[in-house]
Image: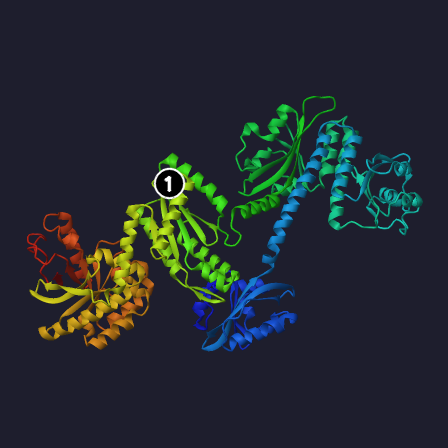
Amino acid sequence: MRPADMPLAATPMDAAEFDTLARLSADAVLVVVDGRIVQGNQAATQLLAVPAPERLLGVALVSLIHPDDVGQVMPSLSRVAAGSLPAEPIEHRLVRADFTHVLVTSEAARCTHAGQPAVMLVLRDAGSRHALERNAVQARAEALHARRLLASENAVLAQLASNASLSTVLRHLCLYVEQVYPNAMSAVLLLDAESQTLRVAAAPTLPAAYATTLEGSPIGPDAGACGCAAYLGDAALIGDIATDPRWQHDRTAALAAGFAAAWALPIRSSRGDKLGVLALFYRQPCLPTEEEQHFLDDITHLAGVAIQKDTTERGLAESEERYRLAISHLNEGVLIQTLDGVVLAANTSAERILRVRPGQLVGRNRLDMMQRVVDEHGKDVALDVLPSKVVRQSGEPILGRVYGLLLKTGELIWTRMNIIPIRRHGDAAPSSIMLSFADITDFKRAEQRLRHLASHDALTGLTNRSFFIAHLEGAIERARDESRELALFFLDLDRFKSVNDTAGHACGDTLLQSAAARLTDCIGPGDVIARLGGDEFVILIEQRVEGKRIALLAERLLAAMREPFDTVNGRYYLGVSIGVALYPHDGISGTDLLRSADAAMYRAKQNGRNRAQFYTAELNARLQRRYLLENALRDACDNRELQLVYQPKYDLASHRIVGAEALLRWNSVKLGAVSPVEFIPVAEETGLIVPIGEWVLRRACEQAVAWYQALGYDFRMAVNLSARQFQTGDVVPMIEQTLAETGLPPTALEVEITESLLMGGADEVRPMFDALTAQGIRISIDDFGTGYSSLSYLQRFPISNVKIDRSFILGIPGDPDSVALTEAIVAMARALGMTVTAEGGGRRRSGGVPGQGGLPGDPGLLHR
């Protein structure tokens, strides 16, 4: 349970409790005494950017609070420290160790530390919550924008792949740039190496008159943006044409055309030779951001590829070399491979995206780096339909396809890929293939987050109604095909509406979140829980739909919701009404099954709320019996319905009764005689075994005192103690108090335990055993041989007696295995100095154990 879900009350807290709380908490937790930090958890070190919790000790809390927020935070903490109720959550800023600020939500409550009044602070990062909605909206916008840009990019790449003319390619490139920057007019000017002038190669939207002015422009340090960029070989970013000294040539023409700013970036060949410039003209003064300049750098690289392809078609080797250099700076990964998939060239982005070291791609088959390829839906792509093979066969490019590449490392990389055939000049068939791909893993994750938001309830994080209905129909189809059953729980919170109306919707939302968390904790990993709306929830069980499991789950859900809910507004008791329907018995469609479960839930409300109603008669009867047992058992002690009977213990050596075992019986006024086999498990599950066990011990000790005095010799009373009683931690004081108040000597008491107690908490119960045996109380293992404990427990624990299960004794003398096991247990116990009690139904067996005339009659063997 997270700290936010715990009642914030003034309770003592030792170091171990704090460590447990802090370790389980994902929130930062601090304990403050007299204004200084005395304890902090690991999450606090991460939030405050300190290397270890120890670095927080002794730090004044006020030094961590932003100066502007001290006046808001400290008075609230002072009120909490003075004994007021827990303060309302406060949003404020903290100053981290690296002097950055973080926005947090803090809650405070009184506690004690080392006997001193203290305040416990729970801190949560609030910045991510505020940013969540903005991020979701931004992710949608970015996804839409990315799709549009990639479509335009694909058009440019398609022109490159289709042997289009250079002017056509550059025109599409300019239009692509203008789509990214709608306020710009783009042009590409090529450098004439002989005359060192520029000529216009593409200017689809530039005014014709100004485009004519640019034709034949000289290059130089003051020849305007285009001439300066071509001359220096570096970007010339002119934010104000009217005042920039680099624009001396034809400044008047630019201003007359209405332009106020111009950005020019050099276009280089793969060898670095200047080929021309990419120019953007604006009608308002402006300069690019660093990100914009990086994008335009990529565009200039792409323009360079186009120009170089136009001039190098005559030789494939020279062309491929220039492509490798031109694309080496692209953010997209680019591979050139043979038709069989062997990589001929790869840029650094390809190596980065495919998670390989430089030089590892060339010479290897591309598929060697990955386990498999999946399509955008996550389905495997067969080898014969891999995109590169399809392009090889068809000769047509594949553009903008999404593929997932599962690398050898196990990492799944999502890419948007273009597969383009490369042809030698004049050839119809491709000679090699170029793959360009962008890493869109983050984009895919954003899409997955959006899908999650579409299929999950925003308040509780559970599956929402629409997604659950679709899942339910699919589950029914699978169950029908496999002849399986399904169980559907329909849950409605009791008294939620009145709490929501009186305490407010914020409190109601908190209760819904807490209820969802409790319900989720009750179900298994394969079960599905959803919020239908309001205070209605559903749970679908698809596997192991068995009567006992369904009944136990219903009990767990009811028990979880009976516990109070602690909020900042106070403590609330809700409860839940549950309806359960089974497929196919109560409905063969999702609608029918929901209707049946809903009807059962309403019957549960009509029958008194806070209970479960099964649409199936058999399960309903079982749960009703369980309810009747629990309710009747709660009143059994007060109504004096419980009684003890005593099984005598007979010493086969001395032929006298030396003790007795107290056995609990219940004769219910409502239910009649109830078998211990039926009511003891209910008492264990509900915790009623603890008060009942104390009552049994007291009554047995009182009876033992009477017999002890009447017989005049040692008489020992055996009482069974539940593992649940040991788990409370106060069983030893309880026994000591009972012995003191009844007057029974400790040596006259024998405590019977089961093997499961030793197996489930050996380290915890050993000190308790030692404390009991130190007073002379004997410890006996009940039903020895039926559990799974190790024989080493007999050596590790101070066991005085073992009681052989009656299943072995009843097999004597007819069953040789029972005889052998009994002899072995008796011999082992004798060797360890223990006595043995044989459960034999109260009569002696004869002719069973060889050489003993029945059960062994030597000292130390008892019979009951």
Q: Is residue 75 above or below residue 653?
A: below
Return the residue nearer the eye: 631 or 708.
631
Tell me, yes or no, if residue 58 can be seen here.
no
Q: Amino acid at mark 1?
A: Gly
Q: Report the quarter where the C terminus lies.
A: bottom left
Image side of residue 554 versus residue 158, left or right: left
Residue on which disc 1 sits: 587
Return the residue nearer the eye: 48 or 328.
48
Percent from the top left, x then y, of residue 697?
Answer: 22, 69
> Is disc 1 placed on a helix, strand or loop?
loop
Percent from the top left, x then y, of residue 584?
Answer: 35, 39
Image side of residue 96 versus residue 700, left or right: right
The residue lying at 33 percent from left, 68 percent from top is: 729
**Hey, which quadrant is residue 61 in on the image?**
bottom right
Image side of residue 160 versus residue 117, left or right: right
Q: Is residue 209 above or below residue 768?
A: above
Colour setting: rainbow
Image side of residue 481 versus residue 437, left or right: left
**Hey, which quadrant is residue 259 in on the image?**
top right
Return the residue nearer the eye: 286 or 736.
286
Seen from this angle, which residue lies furthest front?
606
The residue lying at 38 percent from left, 54 percent from top is: 577
Q: Report the quarter where the N terminus lies.
A: bottom left
The residue lying at 64 percent from left, 49 percent from top is: 138
